[in-house]
Amino acid sequence: MNAVSILLAAAVLVANTSASATTTALPSVTVPGQSVASAPSAVTREDIDKLRESLAKTREELAELKPVASVTNTVFYFVAGLSALLGVFGWRKFSDLDSLVGEQVKLQLPRDKREFAEYEEMANSAQEIHTKLKAITADYESALSNMKYIDVLGEDFDIEGKLHILSEESATRKAKPIEGSNIGFEGTLYESSWRSSTIALLSRLPAIIKRRNLDAEMLFNAAQLCRRMDQYEIAQQVTEAAFEKSPSAANKALMLSSTVKSRTDEAVVKAFAELMDMIRNLGRDSPHIVLAEAWNAAVDQAAYDRLIEAIDDLVRKHEEDPSVFLPSYAYVTKALCILSQSAPGALQEAEEAAERAKEVLGRETTRSSWVSSSVSEIQTVELAIMQTRILHASLAGDDQQTGEPTAEMLQEAFKIMSLSSRADMAPDTE
């Protein structure tokens, strides 16, 4: 830029000098040997000021041109670099750059997914280990706490709480499906460590019963737990010990039902007959347990008709003498037997029995020991009736019956039924 400035300044100087020579007269100086025409022109102060102004103006113009020159250089270098890039890789390779990047992304994505799945599995495993560690820590702390009272605590300490927890937990474990990938059967009834500790406790129960007075509800749950664990002999030992300790109607029904389940000789026939006689002469001592154990025996022997006959005999006795005790749960049990038999007209007969159960339930109080069981079983009966009708309508191709559930409800209805745990119902077959 300095060279350009000098050249421009020189050009302006020459132009101004020439212009001044034509307009301003210079003083004449006589030099020996020279004529007047050859003498040099005089430069005035005005010419010098004009030259300075021209130079200043030139500098300003050059300053304004600097940004333009910078942008021009940038564009030039960019074009040159782009040309070099295209020259090295070629137009075709450059245009395929987007597709090359896309291919690399497609190759990397599966790898990222696999890594994420591995990390997720590791996190789940860590969470499972953490849960188990917390459980072990809690057991250890409980054991340390119990050591303080070792002189007063025995094997039957809080047996009520232990049985309640095991009964609830067994129902949850029973509902969990056994999958082939679950090698250790974790969370099911067949998980080795849980099963061993549960059976060990149940095995000690007959001896504990002889020392302790346990109510009928607890003994019923303990017997159901033994059956759920396929420990029928232990169930019989538990119920026999309970009856020997307290020969109540509930304990007798528990013992007779266990005999039907665990024996194969004439004792089964005798025990079943005694159970049916207990239904015909049903008392107020835990009637829902007596009926439940009669139901269990009827299921084991596929003798629903005999249980229906025994309940009908009880109904007739009540109709002849209203003072004869007839709880709502008797009608519910009859409805279950009718549905299980699946004889012609079963739906209508089961509905009638359920309606009778509701009528009697309307005269009972919530303080009755069997009322909650009646309510639960009525819901079970009505759900089974609804499912059956939906199924029949679906098979017949008539999904738009007036006042009837549509076939779209079939799957949901069966789902609801599958979630219902038989462990929460008194008439349990296990």
Image (cartoon, rainbow, N blue to C red):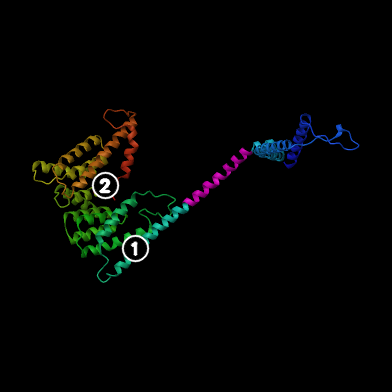
Q: Nearer the viewer, mark 2 or mark 1?
A: 1
Question: What residue is shown with label 1?
Answer: 139
Which residue is nearer to you in this view: 159 or 141? 141
Q: Earlier in the sequence, mark 2 or mark 1?
A: 1
Q: Quadrant of residue 129?
A: bottom left
Q: How many angstroms separate mark 2 from mark 1 (CA)? A: 39 Å
Q: Residues within 10 Å of mark 2 (few under 14, many from 20)?
A: some
Residue 34, position as x, y percentages in the image: 89, 35
Q: What span is in magenta?
A: 97-120
Q: Residues within 10 Å of mark 1 (few under 14, many from 20)?
A: few
Q: Are marks 2 and 1 in contact (CB under 8 Å)?
A: no
Q: Using residue 308 as the reference point, say whether residue 11 is left or right of it.
A: right
Q: Let me know if residue 104 is in the magenta part.
A: yes
Q: Quadrant of residue 364?
A: top left
Q: Amino acid at mark 1?
A: Asp
- Give the quarter of the figure containing the N terminus: top right
**Circle 1 SS class:** helix
Q: Which mark is residue 299?
A: 2
Q: Using residue 39 as the reference point, say whether residue 225 is left or right of it.
A: left
Q: Amino acid at mark 2?
A: Val
Q: Quadrant of residue 218?
A: bottom left
